[in-house]
Amino acid sequence: MTAEPAPLLALLRRRIDVEGPLTIATYMADCLGHPIHGYYRMSDPLGARGDFITAPEVSQMFGELIGLWCADLWQRLGAPDPVRLVELGPGRGTLMADALRAARLVPGFRAAIRLHLVETGLVFRRLQAAALAGSGLDPQWHDHWDQVPDDAPTLVIANEFFDALPIRQFQQTEQGWAERCVAADAEGPGLRLILGRATPAIANLIPAGFRDAASGTIVEVAPAALATAAALADRIARRDGGALVIDYGYCRSAPGDTWQALRRHHPVSPLDGPGTADLTAHVDFQALGDIARLQAATVHGPVEQGAFLAALGIRQRAARLRQAGAPDIDAALDRLIAPDQMGSLFKVMALTAPGRPVPAGFSGSL
Ligand SMILES: C[S@@+](CC[C@H](N)C(=O)[O-])C[C@H]1O[C@@H](n2cnc3c(N)ncnc32)[C@H](O)[C@@H]1O
């Protein structure tokens, strides 16, 4: 346990006393989004001294290439004006600041942009405002993607956003599928995982391909991620535009427990100190792609981040920055594209409207 009991722990135990065990999704939503004690609500956990570091914080090259990807797609779509540029979970605003700076290279793109940031964290909103103060664009903030006006072609960027959306976990038992839930630990002050009752209704939530899995098998479902992917796909299929989803995850749906917590760059138990660690799950790209196709969007990829950034020219950009005397470029390049670092674990998937050109970086799919 952490030295001081997390304030959210007492609230959760009281809630469990009244409501009974919580689904992992309910627990995760509270840990990350509780209005006062939620992990993302009041603090900035990013960076070398925080709990974890993300690609845009590793190097400006990441955001610059994504800005050029957006500008290039915008041109291929016929340069629509206005275009809504949306970032989901923009963190410190570093990616968007780098993207907008690089996008200056494409005449007319910046002038067409209406900028929208979907962010629930108050500290992050302030950091984003500061990072984008010199951009010449006037961002609008929203708590939820659905609040972005539905009236124009839309480009969406989501880097390490989907992994933060709450998941549910189910386990096969001798009695059938049961949900893994968070309960109060009767023996101590903390929390523990228990299995709910196995029912046919729970079995019905399991993707058909896994229903007959062996006893003990764990399956994850990410309802909020699926709903968000469906909403993005529907908007893009109707209004035109594109979405770029980058995250750690897997290309083909598979059983397994990927729920994890990080504090100060170290894995901890997801039940330890609720609200004080980053809680995430690996993203099931096949499930996101399948639901996006059901909304009539075209799905590109997923491809590995290393291959994607290489196709966008990250090595050439690194060479230019090295020549200009920028420090630590080789270490940053390695971090972003090497297979044993972020290059293979992170995948990239894009959505477009049907019949639109294949976006840069997606000529080959995994
Ligand atoms: C892991 S950080 C990634 C930040 C940034 N994209 C980057 O790459 O540095 C997750 C971001 O999503 C935001 N976030 C998490 N859950 C959210 C939700 N349900 N709605 C809106 N924003 C959310 C967090 O506040 C944070 O900005």
Image (cartoon, grey):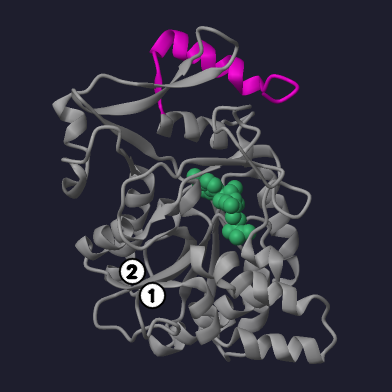
Q: Looking at the image, do the residues carrying marks 1 and 2 touch, with CB atoms under 8 Å apart?
A: yes
Beta carbon of the mark 2 residue lies under 8 A of ligand 1: no
- Which dot marks residue 52? none
Q: Quadrant of the C terminus?
A: bottom left
Residue 119 visible in the current orientation: no
Q: Nearer the viewer, residue 31 or 219?
A: 219
Q: Nearer the viewer, residue 155 or 13?
A: 13
What residue lies at 73% left-to-right and 91% top-to-bottom? 320
Task: Using the numbered discs, state the Cα–Cα distance from disc 1 to disc 2 in whole angstroms.
Answer: 5 Å
The range drawn in magenta is 1-23
- Which dot marks residue 241? 1
Asked if residue 19 is among those painted magenta in the image, a careful observer would answer yes
First along the sequence among labels 1 and 2: 2
Q: Is residue 227 left or right of residue 74?
A: left
Q: Disc 2 residue type?
A: Ile
Residue 360 visible in the current orientation: yes
Rendering coords of residue 104 (x, y %): 64, 85
Asked if residue 358 is among those painted magenta in the image, a careful observer would answer no
- Dividing the picture into quarters, in which one does residue 336 lie? bottom right
Q: Is residue 292 left or right of residue 17?
A: left
For label 1, the SS is strand
Dot 2 crowding, Cα within 10 Å, few <14, some 14–19, many 20+:
many
Q: Quadrant of the N terminus?
A: top right
- Above or below for 3 versus 294: above
Q: Is residue 227 left or right of residue 275?
A: left
Q: Which residue is the site of mark 2?
A: 236
What residue lies at 63% left-to-right and 78% top-to-bottom? 64
Dot 1 crowding, Cα within 10 Å, few <14, some 14–19, many 20+:
many
Q: Disc 1 residue type?
A: Gly
Rendering coords of residue 309 (x, y %): 54, 79
For label 2, the SS is helix
